[in-house]
Image (tube, helix red, strand yellow):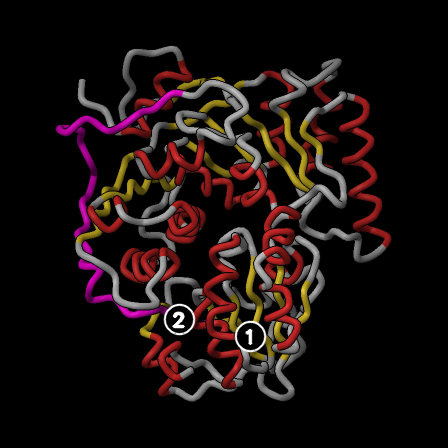
Amino acid sequence: MAQTITEKILAFHAGLKAVEAGQLIEAKVDVALANDVTAPIAIDEFEKLGVKTVFDNERVILIPDHFTPNKDIKSAEQAKLVREFAQKHDLKNYFEIGRVGIEHVLLPEQGLVLPGDLIVGADSHTCTYGALGAFATGVGSTDLAVAMATGRVWFKVPETIKVVYHGKPQAWVEGKDLILYTIGQLKVDGALYQAIEMTGEAIDELPMYGRMSMANMAIEAGAKNGIIAPDEITLDYVRPRAQRDYTLFASDPDAAYCRTIEIDVAAIRPQVAYPPSPDKSRSVDQAAADNIAIDQVVIGSCTNGRIEDFRLAASLLKGRKAAPFMRLLIIPGTPDVYRQMIKEGLTEIFLDADALISPPTCGPCLGGHMGVLAAGERAVATTNRNFVGRMGHPESEVYLSNPAVAAASAIMGRIATPEEI
């Protein structure tokens, strides 16, 4: 029976020879993940189960990254609860302030998520790890509690949409642009509870950081997971980091898909997603023509918080300043990314551009802290969501872009194309 990569991973973890779309299965998980916002609920439910300890103290991972450094008493209490649970169960992969990074940047960097894994996380952007050839999906905190206790979760096997990216991208076009364009085609519910398998020659040439941006935002089309089959680019990234064995899976040539979409990458310009939804993507040229003045730029997040993202932004900001009355926030995804920024002189470039460099945190992406918007303010952000009130006041606006467009916009004080700099 021909299988997609998603079906093969689910079958393997369910102990079955094959599965088919719509089938209900119970599967073993390799990683169960939560953060300081979602873990407290999961911990409460875990305690109600009456179990003595977690299923595996190396595979339950807690990352306090959303409201940290603690922004107020409530967030401090949540972080304290998570910390105490990690101590009680001797969790080997709890990351305290100073070691913590944005979870979906940190875990791949640390080799804690690997090809062929089945990963569940109480965070919707857990699907990021599909870039490694893993099945990774977000679950509710109650489902996560069961996963922490038993190491198992039930799933309905999703149908798979195959998206084939042909051609070579134009200058300044990143993985972020490919996924924004794709979401614009699918719309926010166009892949509801389906897998999005990304393939084609453009994906074959795409670096890991771009693949992670794409898998990260599969959820913005309603997908259960986004996934890219592992290849030599994947293995070059994984081999020096992996802390355990892993298995490579790939779709059979005659696997069945519910839909196939062909995209000519050469025709795509850098994208800007207008509020109030990631599927409102338009060409940066149109956005520049609309002359949209902005108050803030955020470069970072689990979508674009890797060293390559900051190199791209710095290539435009070097020797230039952020526009007057314009706030530029730089948020490295992990301490290692921060260190590399310092080593390469990127922090100096950003400071000279009048940017604020934050410690690793999700912070402003979810309107948490370190860059909340006031009424009437507009931001360009390399984050993944721009719903009403996402970054602060419900009368503020967020426009999503890649780091190059964000940097150009910071310099001009309005949404701008990189070519203008």
Amino acid, disc 1: Ala
Q: Position of residue 404 (x, y in %)?
A: 44, 69
Q: Residue 388 falls in which quadrant of the image?
A: bottom right
Please say whether residue 66 is one of the residues in the magenta stretch.
no
Q: Quadrant of the C terminus?
A: bottom left
According to the image, label 2 marks what residue? 272
Q: How many marks?
A: 2
Secondary element under disc 2, as helix, strand or loop, is strand
Does residue 339 lie above or below 257 as drawn?
below
Amino acid, disc 2: Val
Does residue 303 lie above or below 418 as drawn?
above
Residue at screen point 62% across, 31% down: 142
Residue at screen point 50% across, 56% down: 304
Work out how far the residue at label 2 is from the one at label 1, CA to CA, in angstroms: 12 Å
Q: Quadrant of the N terminus?
A: top left
Residue at screen point 47% across, 23% down: 154
Q: Does 285 sit left or right of 305 as displayed?
A: left
Q: Position of residue 174 (x, y in %)?
A: 36, 60
Q: Position of residue 101 (x, y in %)?
A: 65, 46
According to the image, label 1 marks what residue? 379
Magenta segment, which residues? 247-275
The single residue placed furthest to the left in the displayed view is: 254
Q: Does 12 sit left or right of 144 as displayed?
A: left
Does residue 21 lie above or below 191 as drawn?
above
Secondary element under disc 1, as helix, strand or loop, is strand
Please say whether residue 257 is one of the residues in the magenta stretch.
yes
Does residue 387 lie above or below 26 as drawn?
below
